[in-house]
Amino acid sequence: MKTVLITGGARSGKSHFAQRMAADSGKSVLFVATAQAGDDEMRRRIEAHRNSRPAGWRTLEAPLDVGVRIQSEAGPSHLVLVDCITLLVNNAIGKFLSPDGTDIDEPSAEEAAMKEIEALIRCTQNSVADFILVTNEVGLGLVPDNKLGRVYRDLLGKANQVLAGIADEVYFMVSGLPLRVKP
């Protein structure tokens, strides 16, 4: 079993590369979608992602409890593609926002996000399947001008570091091109 982490900026080709890697493996694939359709634009994005996947892949929609859900529903899949960690962290911390959405209970948000990541790691370690994990690198730009943005950036950065630490391979996507970072 092997774990691959694919990271990069928005629209850098992460999902396309991950899907190509999964398809080229020749293995049965479980696609784990963490996105939630909160508005029409996001619904369109989700539908476009659905249409880009091979028809033979099984899909598990799991905005939270990803590790537990994969363990209980992976079935005969030999490769699990999780797209994406970015939204998983967002989903985990969402319930810790203030009512007006401008503040966040940082300790509780961090605990929730890291519990999701730890459960996912346990899942990868206890499974016979290979894993491809897709995430965004959000720490390359300006420092966000608000607390929520900074907390989110920091928590996703921490999650990405932990996942990169356990991954067998790490790729950084730039303009559709994969740069192998690890090993």
Image: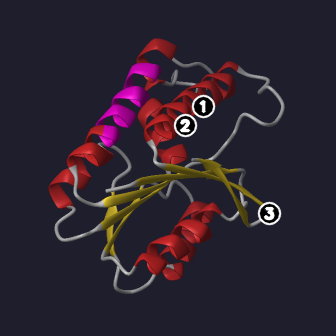
Q: Give the percent coordinates (x, y) of residue 105.
A: 49, 15
Q: What is the quadrant of residue 52 in the picture?
A: bottom right
In reply to whether residue 117 is colored magenta, the answer given is yes
Q: Is residue 177 above or below residue 155?
A: below
What distance separates the C-alpha of mark 2 from that of mark 3? 20 Å
Q: Is residue 88 above or below residue 28?
A: above
Discs 2, 3 touching: Cβ within 8 Å: no
Left or right: 131 in relation to 129: right
Say the numbered circle drawn on residue 5. none
The magenta segment is 110-121
Secondary structure of the residue carrying tag 2 is helix
What distance separates the C-alpha of mark 3 from that of mark 1? 21 Å
| Crowding at mark 2 (Cα within 10 Å: few <14, some 14-19, many 20+) | many
Secondary structure of the residue carrying tag 1 is helix
For mark 3, what is the residue? 175
What distance separates the C-alpha of mark 2 from that of mark 1? 5 Å
Secondary structure of the residue carrying tag 3 is loop
For mark 2, what is the residue? 160
Q: Main secondary structure of the magenta part?
A: helix
Q: Give the percent coordinates (x, y) of residue 139.
A: 72, 34
**Amino acid type, callout 1:** Gly
Q: What is the quadrant of residue 62 in the picture?
A: bottom left
For mark 1, what is the residue? 157
Please tell me which residue is depicted at 54% across the width and 45% down the height of the picture.
Answer: 86
**Amino acid type, callout 2:** Asn
Name the N-terminal-most of marks 3 and 1.
1
